[in-house]
Image (tube, rainbow, N blue to C red):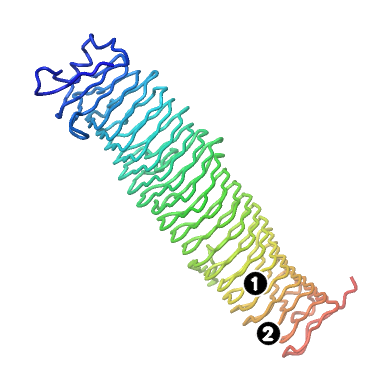
């Protein structure tokens, strides 16, 4: 390797970098060219290239040598190894990359500063390395080779890794990225294998582009396999993370997102991609929290809180795992639409939904804790509290919920439009509305549960059915169970007691109730009340100590 000196003041040295690399006597240097560069600004009017390895080192330490290009051209191009130590590279061209590496080349940059408008294009097959370097306005585009980033800062700059690239990065910082009208991401991984640890992204702004993918601060697609550890995105003004495409698999450990745009989901997994969130947090979002659409999402500890939109949403997806905590969210905490959902160790609390009043004066809640439509949901081990809405709403779907402890939930469970829900081992107290509601061919099955407290009736069915097995309904201000239309209730080994109204109130001649080995006692109204035409069947039951005389027609059944 030849070692030469470049100086703007020493006549015995090369006066410019260009003069050194264009000296043909140095082209055949074994091992390449080693440039010692004296301090100063070296503005080169042509693209610099050298037919072999080259190392550039300032004689007086980092930041004392600046290489700049004039005009619309690249500063450096090479198909060989290029090493820069403590160099400032500056380009004002928005059409050309400051540095382009191809062939068998690589770029190693240590303590460097890159200033420009277009990213460095690293397409060489070698292993490029960037250590303690800063990118301002520019960035890096990796293609084909390998990249290692240690302690680098991207100031209004991007990092892109494309097909057949392997990337390892630690201690990255992204600041103030502006995605522009096309919604360009700060970090894009396409067909890439990557491990990224300790990445902090602040005040990024990626504009949403209708119909365009990749409009997120972090975008992973086209079969990438990526592991993120300690990724933090704060002050974000767009979609923070988007994972998409079949074959794409991403694992997030300790992901933290704060911010987001009101019109988009903060974390989106879509188009058959797979993602796993471990010990992660999505907080203070301006829009929605986490969404899986036509995708697979696994949770192993996720907190979504203080969101203005829905917490977690699955559409035509598989959602599974443990440790979901959703709280202080303005809209539905967990949406499952045409999806298969199985979650354990769930905490849902502090929902303040605003009721909607219809023209007839009736009010209802648009939002609640868990919404299921045309899908299947299983929840095990749930803590729910202070939900000014419903805990569970099932519409034309199927839900199984077990091991629930609920306090101060306005309405516990609703089913409608052929929705079916099975509730097992539930203890719900201090409700304001009906604890259990079934409408429009919906069905609720309740087993081994306890419901206490309601400002209205504890259970309600209109043209729908409710079945209670080994369940206690206690202490409603109104009736225990109210049936409208063709509503039906079936009780086995259950108890209705201490309600202010009737134990069971049938409001239509089409209503039906069957009680088996059950007790209705201590209620302020009839034990069972309704029109003569309604069907009431009971066997081995105790209906006593209710304040009013039994007046409903009672027919013993031997079925």
| Nearest the eye: 189 or 552 | 189
Label 2 sits on a secondary structure element that is loop
Label 1 sits on a secondary structure element that is strand
Q: Is residue 348 left or right of residue 96?
A: right
Quarter of the C terminus within the rendering: bottom right
Q: Identify which residue is drawn at 36% across, 42% down.
A: 172
Alpha-carbon neighbours of circle 2 within 10 Å: few (<14), some, or many (≥20)? many
Disc 2 designates what residue? 498
Position of residue 41 measured from the top left corner of the image (x, y, whole percent): 15, 28
Alpha-carbon neighbours of circle 1 within 10 Å: few (<14), some, or many (≥20)? some
Q: Is residue 391 left or right of residue 553?
A: left
| Nearest the eye: 217 or 531 | 217
Q: Identify which residue is drawn at 18% across, 16% down.
A: 19
Which of the 4 quarters of the picture holds residue 145? top left
How many dots with numbers?
2
| Nearest the eye: 539 or 132 | 132
Distance, label 2 to label 1, CA atoms, is: 17 Å
Residue 73, relative to residue 341: is it above or below? above
Q: Are marks 2 and 1 in contact (CB under 8 Å)?
A: no
Position of residue 383 measured from the top left corner of the image (x, y, whole percent): 58, 66
| Nearest the eye: 506 or 382 | 382
Disc 1 designates what residue? 427
Ranked by sequence position, the earlier of labels 2 and 1 is: 1
Residue 304, relative to residue 168: is it above or below? below
Which of the 4 quarters of the picture holds residue 409? bottom right
Marks 2 and 1: which is nearer the front?
A: 1
Which of the 4 quarters of the picture holds residue 396? bottom right
Q: Identify which residue is drawn at 23% across, 31% down.
A: 87
Position of residue 328 measured from the top left corner of the image (x, y, whole percent): 46, 64
Q: Identify which residue is drawn at 56% across, 55% down.
A: 335
Quarter of the N terminus within the rendering: top left
């Amino acid at each position: 390797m030849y070692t030469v000196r470049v100086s703007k003041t020493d006549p015995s040295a090369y006066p410019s970098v260009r003069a050194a690399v264009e000296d043909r006597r140095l082209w055949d240097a074994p091992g390449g060219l080693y440039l010692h560069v004296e301090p100063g600004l070296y503005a080169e009017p042509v693209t610099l290239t050298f037919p072999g390895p080259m190392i550039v080192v300032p004689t007086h330490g980092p930041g004392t040598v600046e290489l700049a290009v004039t005009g619309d051209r690249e500063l450096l191009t090479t198909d060989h190894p290029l090493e820069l130590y403590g160099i400032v590279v500056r380009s004002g061209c928005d059409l050309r990359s400051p540095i382009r590496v191809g062939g068998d080349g690589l770029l190693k940059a240590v303590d460097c500063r890159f200033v420009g408008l277009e990213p460095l294009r690293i397409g060489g097959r070698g292993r490029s390395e960037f250590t303690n370097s800063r990118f301002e306005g520019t960035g890096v585009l990796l293609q084909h080779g390998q990249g290692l980033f240690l302690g680098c800062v991207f100031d209004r700059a991007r990092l892109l890794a494309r097909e057949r690239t392997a990337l390892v990065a630690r201690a990255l910082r992204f600041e103030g990225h502006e995605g522009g009208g096309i919604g360009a991401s700060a970090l894009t991984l396409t067909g890439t294998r990557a491990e990224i640890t300790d990445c902090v992204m602040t005040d990024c702004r990626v504009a949403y582009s209708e119909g365009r993918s990749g409009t997120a601060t972090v975008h992973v697609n086209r079969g990438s396999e990526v592991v993120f550890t300690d990724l933090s995105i704060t002050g974000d003004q767009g979609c923070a993370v988007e994972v998409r495409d079949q074959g794409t698999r991403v694992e997030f450990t300790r992901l933290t997102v704060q911010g987001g745009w009101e019109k988009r989901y903060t974390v989106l997994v879509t188009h058959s991609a797979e993602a796993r969130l471990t010990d992660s947090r999505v907080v203070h979002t301006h829009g929605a929290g986490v969404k899986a659409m036509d995708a697979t999402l696994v949770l192993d500890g996720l907190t979504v809180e203080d969101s203005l939109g829905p917490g977690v949403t699955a559409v035509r997806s598989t959602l599974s795992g443990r440790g979901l905590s959703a709280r202080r969210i303005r809209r539905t905490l967990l949406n499952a639409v045409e999806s298969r959902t199985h979650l354990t160790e769930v905490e849902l609390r502090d929902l303040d939904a605003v009721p909607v009043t219809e023209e007839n004066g009736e009010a209802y809640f648009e939002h609640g804790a868990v919404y299921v439509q045309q899908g299947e949901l299983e929840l095990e081990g749930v803590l729910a509290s202070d939900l000014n809405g419903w805990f569970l709403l099932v519409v034309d779907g199927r839900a199984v919920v077990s091991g629930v402890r609920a306090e101060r939930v306005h309405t516990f469970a609703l089913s409608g439009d052929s929705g079916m829900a099975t509730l097992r081992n539930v203890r719900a107290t201090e409700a304001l509305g009906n604890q259990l509601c079934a409408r429009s061919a919906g069905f609720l099955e309740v087993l081994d549960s306890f419901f206490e407290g309601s400002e209205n009736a504890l259970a309600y069915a209109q043209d729908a059915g409710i079945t209670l097995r080994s369940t206690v309904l206690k202490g409603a201000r109104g009736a225990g169970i109210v049936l409208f239309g063709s509503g039906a209730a079936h009780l086995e080994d259950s108890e209705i007691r201490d309600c202010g109204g009737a134990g069971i109130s049938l409001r239509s001649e089409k209503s039906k109730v069957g009680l088996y080995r059950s007790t209705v006692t201590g209620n302020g109204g009839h034990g069972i009340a309704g029109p003569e035409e309604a069907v009431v069947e009971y066997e081995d039951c105790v209906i006593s100590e209710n304040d009013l005389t039994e007046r409903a027609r009672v027919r013993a059944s031997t079925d």
